[in-house]
Image (tube, rainbow, N blue to C red):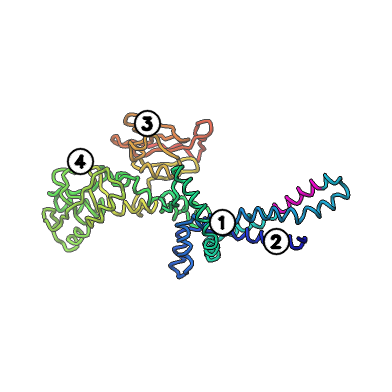
Amino acid sequence: MTAAQSLIIIFVLIAASAFFSLAEISLAASRRIRLRQLAADGDARAPRVTQMQEQPGDYFTVVQIAQNAISIMGGIVGESAFSPYITSVLSLWLSESSAQTVGFLVSFLTVTSLFIVFSDIVPKRMGMTDPELQAMRVYRLMQFFTTVLKPLVWLYSKISDGIFRMLGMNTVRDDRITSDDILAMAEASTQAGGLAQSEQRVIANLFDLDNRLVTSTMTSRDRIAFFLQNDTDALIRARIAEEPYSTYPVCDRDIDHVIGYVDAKDLFQRALNNQAISLKDEGLIHKVLVIPDRLTLTETLDQFRQAQEDFAVVVNEYSLVVGVVTLNDAMSTVMGGLIGPDDEELIVQRDANSWLIDGITPIEDVVYALSIEEFPHFEDYDTLAGFLMVMLRRIPKRTDSVNWGGFKFEVMDVDSYRIDQVLVTRLNAQGQSPETTPDNKRLTSD
């Protein structure tokens, strides 16, 4: 075989090896979702590639048979193509035995380098760049090789299946996409600039609905504006003016005996028509949805859907009212803490190292705002106030503080055993708060 013939054979082998490398990586890297989109757009090749992905055993067996055969042939042809000529040149300076040894090594490294670069690295990078397109380009030729090599494919597949059974391993690819997979893809897309951080946060919040209880987003008992059924017209009008909400619970005797709710628009309509407002009028009061405080936000949304309501009263195991929740409360959690123009922001960042946080702030929002991995005894409380109570093992009072996760949580204001404000300060490496400046004095309350 002449040198020219050997070179032609080597280049043909490199091209063949490159084809099979491209076929292997493109099928493995193809995304099922993307293939479905291409199929929906009318590309007839996409369903065939998807079918190959579902049963990839024969496909990859063909790739391995071809790659190993090409490697063996490349070694044989490569050694005879370059070694004699390199040896003859080196023999001008080296002894015959040394020239043969060095010639063989140079020939081996040359052929190996050509295969590594042109039949492995380059085609695999091509396959990773646009795997779905490359997989659709090569699938017809791969089907042909699968048919031609079917006897060998069958033999090797049976041997492989037997080994898998002996090891107790699954031979079917698991293509289920979990919530963790979606979150990881969203985070990767955000880092790559393909998804806005706010959009990525909404996706994360959607999957967080199953982990957050309704108590983390409800209006707590002490902040509920409600009516008693025997309230007078003047008292109702005054309450509406003082605490304007869209919905008010109506109770008998006290807040723990809820008999329904009244819609503010019905009250406004009567007020505008100069009609007397009486909550004993059954036409004003609607049946209220009552839900337990152990429901997750996902279950709460399901309750709203089934009852076709957007307002619910939350009760504990003793049938005592602990709060109220609206559909907007649950959806604002998805949107990342959406607040209305008249609502007070629960977390206010004062500077790079300190935050003023309301005690009723859901602990999940605190975790996100401070980028803390996890709080201790996470399942025992829902709010920042609950965290402080669990850590202190008592009702906190002003100036009480807890250090956790590189932050200092200091109680700034307590109103009737309720923690109103907490100052959170980032600690330095020595566990101390950064020094305050005249423009950044510690907050105190009267």
Which image quarter: residue 395? top left
Q: Kindly identify which residue carries mark 3.
A: 391
Q: Mark 2 or 4 closer to N-term?
A: 2
- Mark 4 or 1: the one toward you: 1
Amino acid type at circle 1 is: Val
Q: Mark 1 or 2 closer to N-term?
A: 2
Q: Residues within 10 Å of mark 3 (few under 14, many from 20)?
A: some
Q: Mark 2 or 3 closer to N-term?
A: 2
| Left or right relative to 227: residue 205 | right
Cα distance in 3D space between marks 3 and 4: 26 Å
Q: Secondary structure at mark 2?
A: helix
The N terminus sits in image quarter = bottom right
Q: Kindly identify which residue carries mark 1.
A: 63
Q: Is residue 133 visible?
A: no
Q: Kindly identify which residue carries mark 2.
A: 9
Q: Name the foreground residue: 31 vs 211.
A: 31
Dots 2, 3 in contact, CB < 8 A = no
Q: Kindly identify which residue carries mark 4.
A: 320
